[in-house]
Amino acid sequence: MKLTWLGHSSFRLEESTGTAVVTDPYHSSDVGYAMPAVAADIVTVSHAHDDHNNVEEVSGSPKVLDSAGAYEIGGVHFLAAHTYHDGEKGARRGDNLVFRYRMDGVDLCHMGDIGEECNAILVDTLMPVNVLMIPVGGTYTIDAKQAKEYVDSLMPDIVIPMHYKTKDCDMDIDKVHEFLDLFEDENIVYAESATVEFDRADFDGEETKVLVLEKLSK
């Protein structure tokens, strides 16, 4: 399966059959840079804030998944689990959906704008995870240290940080280095592009690698 980082918390996931999923498309006015032009069959929306719900930007008349439940569309299996956008059971920022996808035998997890601390019930619901996409910028989500707790509990083969401050991001959130500093240098991989490909055979379950992607240009 193929994964492309579109910026912020948005990714395009494509199965070998051609079925494509876009996660959390954003409005440029809320992030500071433009959402790339993409098409998809399905869009998953973790919550209704403008930096995560610009569904109209995705072409192809996609099916929109924005509520908790289990789904199967185009051969892709989805699990959307209810969580909170803050550490006060949603009192400050409301609800959040964490999505788990199974594509080409690879288990992926997108944490949306999760704000609650790591807990055993959610970990049990989401495991196993091969590829974890997790916010690390703090302020509106969990911060770097809280994200590391999820990584240690979920034990993914690959973790991809998202929702952090890049050079063209206007949001008051931390840079990715706060998160990277919590890992050994030999476990951090800097990709030279926005797109990577994964195969089930790539994962041995022995250690977690942090993969830092380039953002796709519009």
Image (tube, rainbow, N blue to C red):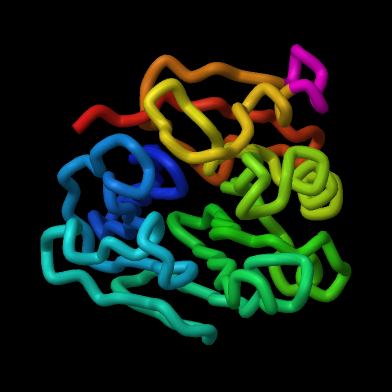
* Residue 166 position (above or below residue 160): above
Q: Residue at x 18, y 65 (%)?
A: 56
Q: Residue at x 57, y 47 (%)?
A: 133
Give whichever of 95, 17 is nearer the camera: 95
Specify start and end residues of the magenta stretch as a single range.
181-187
Residue 116 image offset from top left, x and y in percent: 75, 65
In the picture, measured across the screen, residue 197 lies left or right of residue 207, that is left
Give whichever of 102, 159 is nearer the camera: 159
Q: Is 176 a magenta residue?
A: no
* Residue 109 position (above or below residue 181): below
Residue 80 image offset from top left, x and y in percent: 54, 76
Residue 160 image offset from top left, x and y in percent: 58, 38
Quadrant assignment for the C terminus: top left
* Residue 149 position (above or below residue 110): above
In the picture, measured across the screen, residue 195 lies left or right of residue 18, that is right
Q: Residue at x 46, y 48 (%)?
A: 9
Residue 119 image offset from top left, x and y in percent: 85, 67
Q: Could you say which quadrant of the image residue 59 lies in?
A: bottom left
In the picture, measured across the screen, residue 123 lies left or right of residue 209, that is right
